[in-house]
Each structure stands twice: as C-alpha cells, then as structure tokens.
Image (cartoon, grey):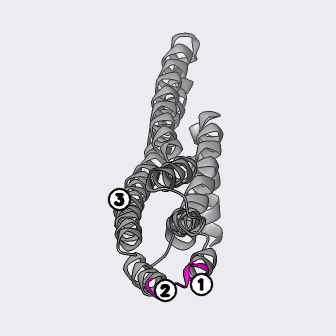
Amino acid sequence: MSQMITFIAKFFQEGGPFMFVILGVLAFGVAIMIERAYYLIIRCRINAKTLLSQITKLVRSDKVSDARKLCVQSKAPLAIILESALWHYEQGLSNEEIQNAVDETALRELPKVQRRTHYLSLSSNVSTLLGLLGTITGLMAAFGALAAADPSQKAVLLALGIAQAMNTTAWGLIVAIPCMVAFSVLSARANDIIEEIDESSVRLLNFLFIQRSGR
C-alpha cells in the first residue's frame, strides 16, 4: 500500500500542475456519475407493465382514486405522469384537456431524466484536452530548459520534461475513458426511460378514452 501511495505521489509530482486540474475534472465527473446513476437506476426504477395492469384493473372497477394512490407511492417520472392523467380523468375533463395536462406534466418531468448527463461527455473531452495541453507545456519546458542548461543537466531536464508530458497525457486518458463509458451507459438508460414513458402514457390515455366512451 505504501509503495502504491509513493508511486501515485511521484506520478502527480512529475506530471506538473495540470494533473491537479484533471483531478478536479475527475471529482466533478464522479459526482455526476453518482447522482445520475442514483436517479436513473434507483429513483426511476418501476415496472411499467405491472403498474399499467394494476391501474387498468382499478379504473375498470371505478376505483380511480386507488389507482392514483398506487402512482403516488412512486417518485418515478412515469408514475407522476400517469397520476396526472388519472387525476384529470377523475375530474371529468375532456379528452383533449387530459391530453394537454399529460403533455404539460411530461414537459416538466422528461428533462429531469436527461439532466446533467451531457456533463460526462464534457468532462471526458476536457480531461483529454487538458492532458494534451500538459503534454505540450511539458515538452516546451523541457526543450526550453535544454537551450540554456549545463550539458551535464540536459539529460535530467529532458527526462523531467518528457515525464511531465507522458504523465499528463496518461492521466487525462485515465479520467476521460470512464467518463465516456458512464456517459454512454447513462444516456442509454435515460433513452430507455423516455421511451417507456411515451409508450405507457399513450397506452393509459387510450385506455381512459375508450373507458369513457364505453360508459
């Protein structure tokens, strides 16, 4: 463990100031990963087919209030949108008014699904560019020092400059890769949730409209 700590300390020391800037990008990216993973995987977790099946059974039995209570138990965007449709249906509003109310609720809830995910892509790009910038500055410092350095010190200065350049590049890529992977995974999850919301809300609205016309 002590050897690992020593290696990391030396790695950062030789990498120069851009290493700590990239570390800040990593901290930002990890915070976004944790928050988005919690929201998309835990907060939005819901069995849409089961929920719709339970709602339709309750509505057929004229238990719309119970169906709404079933939705209120979950804080997932899908449940919130379905509850909105049921509430306006219970109030006896027209089909068009129910549709407009559901659209309004969706406009409020759907952006929450995609919120902040794009910052992971930004973090990946920024860390890569910072690594490249650190590489350039490291090489510039190395060759600049060689011009005025004592011949006996040239090899040492060149080694330090190259170490800074390579360490910064490596660190930038180490941060960029997991950020990009997390962006792809979480974006795919967000798209799945949005598709599920669209499909489920349309199915419920069609059911409610048919249920009303059959009365």
Task: Identify residue for label 2.
Answer: 58
User: Relative to 145, is 87 above or below?
Assistant: below
Crowdedness near tag 3: few (<14), some (14–19) or many (≥20) residues, C-alpha within 10 Å: few
Task: Identify residue for label 1.
Answer: 66
Q: Name the spot of residue 91 as percent of width and height, x first.
A: 60, 65
| Helix, strand or loop at mark 1 | helix
Which residue shows up at 60% across the image and 43% down it?
25
Q: Residue furthest front?
A: 215
Q: Point out the image quarter for the N terminus.
A: bottom right
Kind of residue sitting beneath label 2: Leu
* Residues at circles 1 and 2 in contact by the CB criterion of under 8 Å: yes
Q: Name the spot of residue 207 as percent of width and height, x first.
A: 36, 71
| Helix, strand or loop at mark 2 | helix
Is 61 a magenta residue? yes
* Residues at circles 3 and 1 in contact by the CB criterion of under 8 Å: no
Task: Identify residue for label 3.
Answer: 195
User: Relative to 19, is 154 above or below?
Assistant: above
- Mark earlier in primary sequence (3, 1): 1
Q: Is residue 150 left or right of residue 121?
A: right
Determine the CA span between mark 3 and mark 1. Answer: 26 Å
Please report the bounds of the magenta region as a residue range. 60-67
Which mark is in front, 3 or 1? 1
User: As rendered, which of 162 and 192 lies closer to the eye?
Assistant: 192
Residue 121 shows which numbered tag? none
Is 213 a magenta residue? no
User: As rendered, which of 175 and 85 lies closer to the eye?
Assistant: 85
